[in-house]
Image (tube, helix red, strand yellow):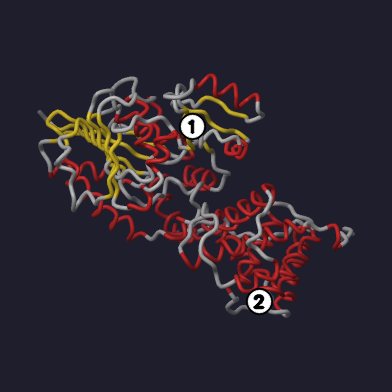
Amino acid sequence: MQRIAPKATRSTGENRARLAAVQQLMRIDEEGAYVGLVGGSPTRTQPHARKRDPQAPLDSRDARFVTELVFGVTRWRRRLDWLISQLRPTGGTLDPELLQILRLGIFELLELGKPDWAINSHVDLAKELVRPEAGRLVNGVLRNLTRMRTANAIPRPKLEQGFSQRQQADVFGIASSHPSWLVERWLQRFGEADTLKLLASNNRRPVYSLRVNTMKVDIGALEQELQESGVEVERSPYLSGEYLRVKSGLQDVLAQGLLSDGLCQVQDESAGMVVSLLDPQPGERVLDACAAPGGKALFAAARMRGEGQLMAMDANARRLRGLPATAAQQGVPAGFLTIGAADLRESLPEQHAPFDKVLLDVPCSGLGVLAKRADLRWRRQPADILSNAQLQDALLDAAARLVRPGGLLVYSTCSIEPEENDLRVDAFISRHPDFVAEPAPTGLLPDSVLNQNGFMATFPHVHGIDGAFGARIRHRQ
């Protein structure tokens, strides 16, 4: 029999972290916040939370625990809810806070392997945030789960012989915690084996990479500095001269102030490959037309060595606010980078046109980045892909007016769906016979990330990075 830990030895920090996690999970569900959000407006749990003063700073270890809980519960939400339905003695609707506490408890017991005595923290939390009798329900559900865990009898959805593809998608969707419509879509497109690999990839801990600012530091020097400080990094297999993949110790990178010193920025390699596809050169006139928050524009500035003209614009002024300060930190010369808030469809920067190169990284479903943005899988619907396509077409038509004859338009997304990618390029070319799609020049990107048309197309389960798309479209002379 497992010994119950004395109350005095339990981690007060962990208990406060659980409370903070419930608050953030409530924000995700009720306010549309995303899993990377820290702080912000109060939730309806806040009046209860004052009993434990949740706004008092957590130490770095407990803050990381909050992040792990929020990301994990968000990622595994569908499977957690299915398990709750199997473990509860009666059905009915649960209070939102109570549902989050049950999700949290099941996640900790199954995914983090917490001991049985950790249940008491979740019971106390239910009593405090919901009502005293809610603690009994939490205790019953979680004790039932620990008995099943001990007996190796955790319930699992079963795939039966003769199931339709829709039923198969339901089973895989519960087991992998994805919406059934998305699983069914991928089964039709990729087949069962690759779909299962993609689902598993979306549920792994995200891989983070650093784009080294070669305007201020040599990649070899920064690599050595990080390794000597205990951060485990390796060169990117796709962009070995400018990217380091962080295998462990990302928090240490942040703590060392390397980002605030402008020596590097956290940016996925797929985003870097889009800029490589654009291939901005010193002396050119370049527009990043949907630039916020500005990571690709800053990489373009480094590639251009601060020579020429670079304009970054976006319809969302708020998301551009931090770009001037970050550009200054990274050593971007004053006067080289122009930043403006405008909707490309309504306010074209024609006074700066024509541009040699235009990067159009359009709003999209984000279905290539579900490892980092697990909340997106619960926010997206099939209709979103079609509505995105209409916006993407409008942005492409607007951007085309700004490319000089002989110039280059690069269209990109962080989606893996053809309706947002290849099909948008095909539709654009059919509307604009003065443009032609062209394959990536030899040596610009590895062949492994190019599809049959020579477009960039990365997939999480194939390339180990975010799913993304990029196509070069040339304005005929």
Q: Nearer the viewer, residue 101 or 87?
A: 101
Q: Classify residue 250 as left or right of residue 327.
A: right
| In this view, the mark in front (1 or 2) | 1
Report the amino acid beneath label 1: Cys
Query: Percent x, y for residue 284?
Result: 23, 26
**Pointers 1 and 2 in contact (C-beta within 8 Å):** no
Q: In which quarter of the image is the N terminus?
A: bottom right
Task: Tell me which label, 1 or 2, sits earlier in the chain.
Answer: 2
The residue furthest front is 334
Give the label on residue 130, or none. Answer: 2
Query: Percent x, y for residue 197?
Result: 51, 43
Report the amino acid beneath label 2: Val
Relative to 50, say whether 220 is above or below: above
Relative to 200, say whether 471 is above or below: above
Q: Is mark 2 on a helix, strand or loop?
A: loop
**Residue at 73 percent of width and 79 percent of height:** 132
Q: What element carries label 1?
A: strand
Q: Quadrant of the C terminus?
A: top left
Query: Percent x, y for residue 194?
Result: 47, 42
How many numbered marks have been drawn onto this rendered protein structure? 2
Q: Classify residue 445 as left or right of residue 437.
A: right
**Residue at 60 percent of width and 76 percent of height:** 94
Relative to 315, say whether 221 is above or below: above
Q: In which quarter of the image is residue 22?
A: bottom right
Query: Percent x, y for residue 375?
Result: 49, 56
Q: Mark 1 points at which residue?
A: 264
